[in-house]
Image (cartoon, grey):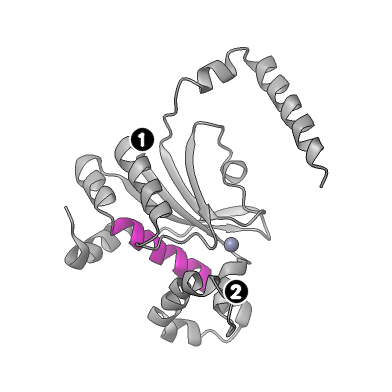
Amino acid sequence: MDISKIFKNNHKWVEDKLQLNPDYFKKLSEGQNPDILYIGCSDSRVTAEDLMGVTPGEAFVHRNIANMVPNTDLSAMSVIDYAVSHLKVNHVVVCGHYYCGGVKAAMQSADLGILNPWLRNIRDVYRIHQAELDSITDEDQRYKRLVELNVEEQCRNVIKTAEVQRAYNDRGITVHGWVFDIHSGKLIDLNIDYLKIMENVMEIYRLE
Ligand SMILES: [Zn+2]
């Protein structure tokens, strides 16, 4: 990749935006008021804004390998706290994707160094759902199902936070689990039973 091309692209992007609205960047500099927190994978093919069709200012975004929400990860926890308690988003989305390298790596028996503790969180998801996953004979299907179950478990981790529980009581914040299918370009709503998960989580993890 020619890095200098990026600055040319940026220059053109600025011109395009200003042509549509001369105050575009002035307005952007005044602050943000996003209604959605998007937690997705760092995968270069899964571009948050593009696949949702949103513009700058509309989504607060956090991306890491395999869209994880570990409860000891300072970065993910800070993002949730800031988005939910300060920006007051009304929707939190965990978006996984089929053909996720992180999920695939977690399905293989290999020492991956610093990635071991990170991917162990996905192996834990496998352990929790082992009976269902082991019953799927087709490897591709099993891999896709793990992507979906991982999204659901990360939604559960989002719901375990005090910020989200408080925002649920105060203003009925909603948590969504989605999967982006790279093969078709389609965004799939897993239609997680958010209220039932909330109810289950509250039995043990209630903080509010
Ligand atoms: Zn991924």
Residue 82, above or below 21: below
Which residue carries the number 1 mark? 87
Q: Earlier in the sequence, mark 2 or mark 1?
A: 1
Q: Residue at x 17, y 66 (%)?
A: 203
| Rendered image: mark on residue 174 | none
Q: Position of residue 48 (x, y in %)?
A: 57, 46
Q: CA distance from mark 2 to mark 1?
A: 34 Å
Residue 192 visible to the viewer: no
Q: Residue at x 57, y 68 (%)?
A: 102
Q: Position of residue 128 (x, y in %)?
A: 38, 79
Q: Quadrant of ligand 1?
A: bottom right
70 relative to 3 in the view: left or right: left
Residue 131 visible to the viewer: yes
166 relative to 46 in the view: left or right: left
Q: Residue furthest front?
A: 114
Dot 1: few (<14), some (14–19), or many (≥20) neighbours within 10 Å? some
What secondary structure is marked by label 1? loop
- Dominant SS of magenta comes to helix
Q: Residue at x 28, y 49 (%)?
A: 164
Q: Position of residue 6 (x, y in %)?
A: 76, 37
Q: Position of residue 130 (x, y in %)?
A: 43, 84
Dot 2: few (<14), some (14–19), or many (≥20) neighbours within 10 Å? some
What secondary structure is marked by label 2? helix
Residue span colored magenta: 144-160
- The amino acid type, in three-letter code, at marker 2 is Lys
Which residue carries the number 2 mark? 104
152 relative to 186 in the view: left or right: left
